[in-house]
Image (cartoon, rainbow, N blue to C red):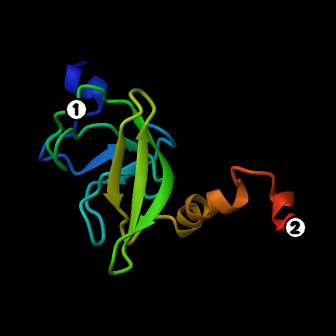
Amino acid sequence: MSREQRRGVRREKERSFRCGHCRLDVPSDAFGTARNHCPNCLWSRHLDDDRPGDCAAECGSLMEPIAITVRGAGEWILVHRCTGCDELHLNRTAGDDNPLILLRVAVRPLAQPPFPIERIGNL
């Protein structure tokens, strides 16, 4: 097995990849954006370093979707954290991303606040 295969690096001509988290075979084509994460579980792989698509990262670890941010025009952006080196990356959502998982990531701060929820009643 080549180094690129072990790290999960995609070649330009490859049309799909297997998700390292849920093991789904994912087509490289994405509705509305370049595919850089699994549409089922939203996990990604740390492949890019300085710019999207450069495949220059040495890490190659899985990247967990940890948050959602919203750009000015209302576009949802996934925030991924690398499980190997803790680097953060922003990735555009795609039209075929699992809406339930997107909502789960988006409401996580409300469902798990960083303070006891009972404090709100004392305000």
Residue that label 2 marks = 121
In the rendered image, residue 79, in percent from the top left (x then y), is placed at 42, 53
Residue 4: mark = none
Taking depth in this image into account, of 17 and 97 the one nearest to the observer is 97
Quadrant (top left, top right, bottom left, bottom right) of the C terminus: bottom right
Other residues around mark 1 within 10 Å, as few (<14) / some (14–19) / many (≥20): some
The amino acid beneath tag 1 is Ala
Which of the marked residues, 2 or 1, is nearer the chain's N terminus? 1
Residue 76, quarter of the rendered image: bottom left
At label 2, which amino acid type do we have?
A: Gly
**As drawn, is 67 to the left or to the right of 9?**
right
Q: Give the residue pinned by disc 1.
A: 57
Q: Residue visible at 68% across and 62% down?
A: 110
When the figure is inspected, residue 77 is found, relative to residue 6, above or below; the finding is: below
* Horizontal and vertical percent position of residue 120: 81, 65
Residue beneath the point at 41% across and 58% down: 78
- Label 2, residues with CA under 10 Å away: few <14, some 14-19, many ≥20: few
Residue 108 in the image, given as x and y percentages of width and height: 63, 57
Q: Residue furthest front?
A: 123
Local secondary structure at mark 1: loop
Quadrant that contains the N terminus:
top left
Q: Nearer the viewer, residue 113 or 93?
A: 113
- Residue 19 in view of the camera: no
